[in-house]
Amino acid sequence: MPDDEQRPDASAGGQTPRAGAAPRVPPRWFVRTAWVVHRAIYRLSGGRLGLSRPRPTRWGMMHLTTTGRRTGQRRAVIVAYMEDGPNLVTLAMNGWADAEPAWWLNLQAQPDATVTIKDGTRAVRARAAQGAERDRLWEAWKHLGDDLDGYSTLRTTPTTVVVLEPRPS
């Protein structure tokens, strides 16, 4: 698509993003390698490195463990998050690729999961934010230091805002 055309932003409620090119992302091989390295740092450090608390202008990093939808085995990933009261919120963006991330597909099949953040481990239940809640959380993510609307133009489908609600252990 030429740089001067606009692409509808399915992620931001169908609004048209600003004119111009979408932000550039690294090649897919680089993104996937970074994910593998990040998980390795977390694992090799015994969880001492690789996680961070969210700050007012930046998201944090958490370790999310899901149940594989096909295998039933535990699957772990490190994803960005922000806090919304007792809930943790993340985006099912898959490095801004079109496909849904496997961890989100797993959560759709089995919404109970575990997250580890700097403050400890929590049992959570996942759901997709809808309507006004989604709009509010999307706006909150926009203030965390990235060109969220610009990056969302890289995807042809809406980016799911995932809410991880506390559940009894």
Image (cartoon, rainbow, N blue to C red):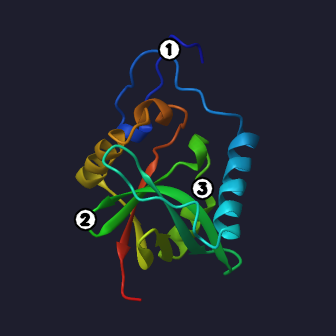
SS class of the residue under badge 2? loop
Above-or-below relation of 99 to 68: above
Q: Nearer the viewer, mark 1 or mark 3?
A: 3
Q: Nearer the viewer, mark 2 or mark 1?
A: 2
SS class of the residue under badge 1? loop
Give the residue number, with chain letter if any, for mark 2: 85
- The amino acid pointed to by label 3 is Pro
- The amino acid pointed to by label 1 is Glu
The reply, left or right, for residue 8 in relation to residue 2 is left
Give the residue number, with chain letter if any, for mark 3: 101
Residue 123: quadrant of the picture: bottom left
For the point 28% across and 46% down, the residue is 135
For the residues bearing labels 2 and 3, Cβ distance under 8 angstroms: no
Q: Is residue 135 visible?
A: yes
SS class of the residue under badge 3? loop
Q: Residues within 10 Å of mark 3 (few under 14, many from 20)?
A: some
- The amino acid pointed to by label 2 is Gly
Quadrant into which the C terminus falls: bottom left
Q: Which mark is residue 5?
A: 1
Residue 76, position as x, y percentages in the image: 62, 69
Q: Is residue 9 visible?
A: no
Q: Mark 2 vs mark 1: which is more N-terminal?
A: 1
Q: Residues within 10 Å of mark 2 (few under 14, many from 20)?
A: few
For the point 47% across and 15% down, the residue is 20
Residue 86: quadrant of the picture: bottom left
Quadrant into which the N terminus falls: top right
Residue 65: quadrant of the picture: bottom right
Q: CA distance from mark 1 to mark 3?
A: 28 Å
